[in-house]
Image: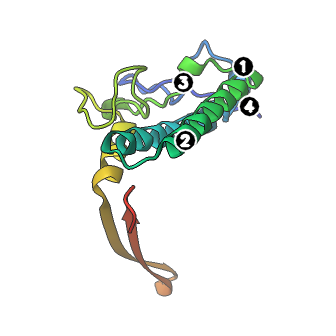
């Protein structure tokens, strides 16, 4: 069984890669998009710390080399799965896209139409705490109780 996804729009089309892309790739475009999202988030944090002057030259060199290697690996995986790197994105309808258009975002600058990556980068930069309780049950019996506290930040806690 092969899964193929196409961009979402108001005409209720499916989600993910354009129809002209390789439908044999299955979930590869989605997984590669998530890896690219993480890579771009890491790159944004490196840029922010570089501009604040908190990275030494050796730290900056190591970080730049690692980001470059990760980008090369993503491009290599795109070749293996026959996915065009430009297709790595998820269209979320009215919410926009998961990744910004190439060259349209620089950490710390607000875009006109922010992508999910930009919003997550801002959250990481400022920090957010989420607390909650979850009760899971069956047959009107609470069987599992979860108390959650999530701290999401790029700053040391």
For the residues labelled 3 and 1, the Cα–Cα distance comes to: 16 Å
Q: Earlier in the sequence, mark 2 or mark 3?
A: 3
Q: Which residue is mark 3?
A: 6
Left or right: 56 as drawn, with respect to 17? left
Residues at discs 2 and 3 in contact (Cβ within 8 Å): no
For the residues labelled 2 and 3, the Cα–Cα distance comes to: 34 Å
| Residue found at x 33% / y 39% | 51
Q: Nearer the viewer, mark 3 or mark 1?
A: 1
**Image position, residue 100 (x, y; %):** 39, 27
For the residues labelled 2 and 1, the Cα–Cα distance comes to: 28 Å
Q: Which residue is mark 1?
A: 82
**Dot 4: few (<14), some (14–19), or many (≥20) neighbours within 10 Å?**
few
Q: Residue furthest front?
A: 57
**Image position, residue 81 (x, y; %):** 74, 25
Q: Which residue is mark 2?
A: 63
Q: Nearer the viewer, mark 4 or mark 1?
A: 1
Q: Earlier in the sequence, mark 4 or mark 2?
A: 4
**Image position, residue 41 (x, y; %):** 45, 41
């Amino acid at each position: 069984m092969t899964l193929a996804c196409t961009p979402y729009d108001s005409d209720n089309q499916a989600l993910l890669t354009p129809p002209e892309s390789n439908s044999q790739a299955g979930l590869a475009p989605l997984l590669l998009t998530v890896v690219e999202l993480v890579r771009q988030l890491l790159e944004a944090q490196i840029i922010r710390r570089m501009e604040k002057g908190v990275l030494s030259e050796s730290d900056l060199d190591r970080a730049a080399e690692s980001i470059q290697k990760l980008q090369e690996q993503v491009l290599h995986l795109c070749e293996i799965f026959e996915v065009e790197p430009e297709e790595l994105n998820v269209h979320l309808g009215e919410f926009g896209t998961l990744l910004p258009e190439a060259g349209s975002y620089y950490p710390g600058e607000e875009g006109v139409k922010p992508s999910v990556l930009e919003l997550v980068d801002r959250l990481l930069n400022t920090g957010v705490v989420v607390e909650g309780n979850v009760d899971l049950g069956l047959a009107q019996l609470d069987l599992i109780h979860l108390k959650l506290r999530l701290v999401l930040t790029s700053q040391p806690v």
